[in-house]
Image (tube, helix red, strand yellow):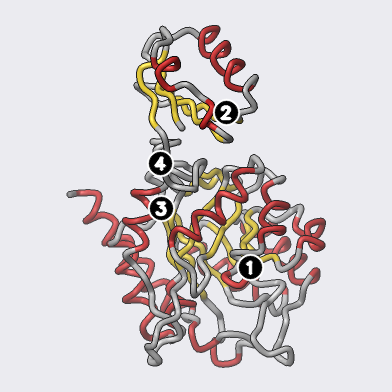
Amino acid sequence: MIAVVKPGASKQQIDSLLAWFRSRGLKTHVSEGEFQTIIGLVGDTSQVDVDLLEGLEIVESVKRINEPFKRANRKFHPADTAVNIGGVILGGGNFQVIAGPCSVESPEQIVCVAESVQASGARLLRGGAFKPRTSPYDFQGLRAEGIEFLLEARAKTGMPIVTEIMNAAHLPLFEPVDVIQVGARNMQNFELLKELGQLRKPILLKRGFANTLKELLMSAEYIMAEGNENVILCERGIRTFETYTRNTLDLSAVPVLQELSHLPVIIDPSHAIGVSRYVPQMALAAVASGADGILIEVHNDPQNAVCDGAQSLTLEQFAHLSEKMQRIREVIAAR
């Protein structure tokens, strides 16, 4: 349920209304826009007398939210959310490129890639320290050492770092990480999501390859219900009957999620397609679709990468793609 406050209501009146809601066991969320203030209510609102509420002097209207996701709902928070990542703003009209290798392999490798993608326009550095793999015999990442190498790259470039968590037990290792990524396999690891909700740092939440958009938003709700509203949604492809690509990139997720939710929406074309020669076209399509950002895999030597080299762009390919993405953004901005 949301209550729209009349323009001109005083802070004292709003605080009194909030206290009234809380006395009835409801959690409140205040969204202050340029022209109106919205109070979102979470909890058992069935006991709230809508007629009584609408009769209050400062209440303009009352609406029930039918969707099960509340805090992630645009009705709850009409303005776009902009996530501040160490001074880099993502969402709310701020487009960002997150680039780097699938796996951190050495300090020399991650610094080399970081410096190159930064020069080409990326503002955030991605790199896998803990790697979820289908086979237990595949490379699982450098783990804590990988995070240390990412921190070295951040120290040299100033780029905030993005890396994936696998287990809540690893949270102490992620304390210096700027953005914690939740991969597709963990999208519905609700205990992990609740732990991440206790933090106040940005969480990049990837859609599971067999999950609906509603399920993605409900997973975001788990994080937000614990108090962490710094959530970034990521479409990374869904599993279909097609076999020429690893997954099928669902670009329709961008306008649908942006209509349903205020959270930023980014696209990961690398994992969606799994074939590097198709990635640039899908990245450009993602920019044209209105995504808030791109998460893309870039490696200094893809042929010898220890993980997912087949879907990684070279440093030169990324530089060329970055120029094209910028031109598309300029066209969109001029419309």
> Which residue is depicted at the point 28% across and 62% down?
288
Of badges 3 and 1, nearer the viewer stands 1
Q: How many angstroms separate mark 1 from mark 2 (CA)?
A: 28 Å
Whole-angstrom CA distance, mark 4 to mark 2, is 15 Å
Q: Which mark is residue 74?
A: 4
User: Foreground: 288 or 151?
Assistant: 288
- Mark 4–mark 3 Cα distance, whole angstroms, equals 19 Å
Say which of 293 and 253 sits in front. 253
Left or right position of 243 against 163: left
* Mark 3 or 2: the one toward you: 2
Q: Which mark is residue 186?
A: 1
Q: Which mark is first along the chain, 2 or 1?
A: 2
Name the disc covering residue 28, or none. 2
Residue 44, by quadrant, is: top right
Q: Earlier in the sequence, mark 3 or mark 1?
A: 3
Mark 4 touches mark 1? (CB < 8 Å): no
Callout 4, which amino acid? Answer: Arg
4 or 2: mark nearer the eye: 2
Marks 1, 2: nearer the viewer? 2
Task: Please tell me whether mark 1 sits on a helix, a strand or a loop.
Answer: helix
The residue that label 3 is drawn on is 95
Q: Residues within 10 Å of mark 4 (few under 14, many from 20)?
A: some
Give the Cα distance between marks 4 and 1: 25 Å
Provide the secondary structure element on which disc 3 rests: loop
Where residue 315 appears, x then y in whole percent?
48, 77
Q: Residues within 10 Å of mark 3 (few under 14, many from 20)?
A: many
CA separation, marks 3 and 1? 26 Å
- Residue 18, compared with residue 313, is above or below; it is above
Q: Amino acid at mark 1?
A: Asn
3D distance between C-alphas at marks 3 and 2: 30 Å
Residue 310 has which mark?
none
Q: Earlier in the sequence, mark 4 or mark 1?
A: 4
